[in-house]
Image (cartoon, rainbow, N blue to C red):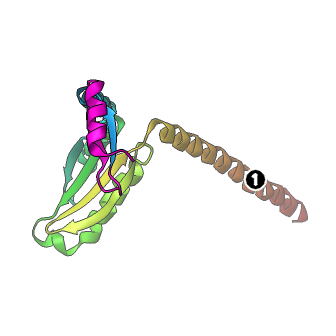
Amino acid sequence: MIPTEQALKYAQERDLDLVEVAADARPPVCRVLDYSKYKYEQDQKAKAARKHQQQVTIREMKLRPKIASHDYETKKGHVRRFLDNGDKVKVTIMFRGRETTHPERGEQLLMRLAEDVEDLGTIEQRPSLDGRNMIMVMNPLKAKERKQHDSERKGKGKRGEAAEEETATPAAEEAPAEAEAS
């Protein structure tokens, strides 16, 4: 532990600054350094951190509970494009009049949309009723997650076909045996 006056004199001799690092510590901790250079380095680190941050934009898609199939497909295409571009999507279902008495229809529509675009995004916020609107928020999948999701889906498809062939084979073998017995 060095007295403050001695530390200040030491710093001034070297044309540096005495900077308090931890004021809460007992005794307080100080460093001898070039403060302007330190501030410059901190600004550069902050600038680099901002540069590497990814800007998240939230896109909104509005639907109605009685949407026609072609309109649904169009809106689904927009949601797919938004998720593919890496944007979050806020899907809103607007209820009018007596439609508010059947919120389950809106929830079914949102879950159907989430299922249709599950290869590109996941549900961040489950459907929730907010006044006359029902809202769901979806996050885009990262590139690694997309590849993994696609490989899982392809794997399930092959297993599903193999299972169908296995179940079809015993039935085909039983039919001729029955014909011979008759």
Segment colored magenta: 1-28
Q: Position of residue 120 (x, y in %)?
A: 41, 42
Q: Quadrant of residue 65?
A: bottom left
**179 vs 105, nearest the viewer:** 105
Q: Count every numbered label the image shows and give the total.
A: 1
Report if residue 9 lies within the magenta region: yes
Report if residue 23 lies within the magenta region: yes
- 63 lies above or below 6: below
Q: Position of residue 5 (x, y in %)?
A: 26, 41
What residue appears at the point 52 percent right and 44 percent down from the top-left corner? 149
What residue appears at the point 21 percent right and 56 percent down from the top-left corner? 92
Q: Position of residue 3 (x, y in %)?
A: 32, 46
| Badge 1 element | helix
Can I make out residue 73 in this image? no
What residue appears at the point 65 percent right and 44 percent down from the top-left corner? 158
Circle 1 residue:
166
